[in-house]
Image (tube, grey):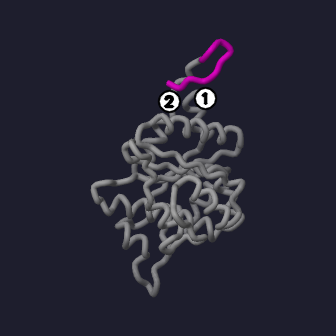
């Protein structure tokens, strides 16, 4: 149950769809779309609140309306995950791929078991700079799979929830989208992230927000 302010103290709003969405994140990333901006904002806010109550889970919120470039993206990321240096690149020893491998445990607390990025208005970057969005989606899926594939005894489950309008659903369904396929390897070789992660393709599932909330009585 989740408590929300009411006219008389608090009323309790039943949690029905949040566990279902979380279950989908066990083995894949999520593209959640809806044409009503208020409905999808509520979806994201409710899910963020739900995740914040879970032990050993870190919630990282990306604000897509403020992301137009690699600089904007890195500015937000380095405020979510502590890092000594973050180069304004996706790959490389100090790029986003390196940051995504970092854990951000707090002294005196157990290290997180799960990290979830909630990317509001993710479709905006896909339209503003599709190449950058493709690179980010691929490195998110690649590093997340790599960390689980390595299985060094301290697995961190890392997922991204891409929230946006119907444009993000259309992006996810494109044959060449990095939400569902790795970039090609060099010279006909196996794609880099397939080699590193052991996964033939990124694992992403789709969620229609309007239908999900309607079915739950929201």
Say which of 195 and 67 sits in front.
67
Residue plotted at (55% across, 20% down): 12
Q: Nearer the viewer, residue 138 or 90?
A: 90
Q: Within the magenta stretch, is there residue 100?
A: no
SS class of the residue under badge 2? loop
User: Horizontal and vertical percent for residue 24?
Assistant: 44, 45
Residue 180 appears in the figure: no
Per the model, the C-alpha gap separating discs 2 and 1 is 9 Å
163 sits left or right of 109 in the view: right
Asked whether the beta carbons under mark 2 and mark 1 sit within 8 Å of each other, the answer is yes
Dot 1 falls on a residue whose secondary structure is loop
The disc at residue 154 is none
Q: Which disc is residue 218 wearing?
A: 1
Q: Give the percent coordinates (x, y) of residue 137.
A: 54, 63
- Residue plotted at (66% across, 66% down): 71
Instruction: Classify mark 1: residues with Cα within 10 Å, few (<14), some (14-19) or many (20+).
Output: some
Q: Is residue 212 above or below residue 156?
A: above
Rendered residue at 49%/67% (across/down): 97
- Label count reads 2
Which range of residues does the magenta coloring cover? 1-10
Residue pointed to by mark 2:
16
Q: Earlier in the sequence, mark 2 or mark 1?
A: 2
> Toward the viewer: 149 or 205?
149
Position of 149 with respect to 47 (left or right) is left
Residue occupying the far front of the picture: 107
Q: Is residue 84 above or below residue 106?
A: below
Q: Looking at the rendering, in which quadrant would you find the C terminus? A: top right
């Amino acid at each position: 149950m989740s408590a929300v302010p009411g006219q008389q103290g608090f009323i309790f709003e039943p949690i029905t769809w949040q566990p279902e969405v979380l279950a989908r994140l066990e083995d894949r990333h999520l593209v959640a779309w809806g044409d009503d901006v208020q409905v999808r904002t509520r979806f994201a806010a409710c899910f963020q609140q739900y995740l914040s109550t879970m032990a050993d889970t870190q919630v990282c919120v990306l604000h897509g309306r403020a992301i137009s470039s690699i600089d904007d993206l890195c500015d937000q990321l380095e405020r979510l995950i502590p890092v000594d240096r973050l180069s304004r690149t996706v790959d490389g020893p100090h790029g986003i791929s390196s940051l995504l491998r970092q854990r951000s445990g707090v002294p005196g607390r157990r290290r997180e078991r799960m990290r979830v990025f909630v990317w509001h208005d993710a479709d905006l970057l896909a339209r503003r700079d599709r190449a950058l969005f493709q690179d980010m989606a691929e490195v998110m899926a690649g590093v997340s799979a790599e960390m689980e594939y390595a299985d060094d005894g301290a697995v961190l489950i890392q997922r991204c929830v891409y929230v946006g309008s119907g444009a993000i659903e259309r992006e996810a369904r494109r044959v060449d989208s990095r939400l569902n396929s790795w970039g090609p390897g060099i010279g006909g070789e196996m794609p880099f992230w397939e080699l590193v992660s052991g996964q033939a393709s990124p694992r992403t599932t789709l969620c229609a927000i309007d239908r999900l909330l309607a079915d739950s009585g929201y």
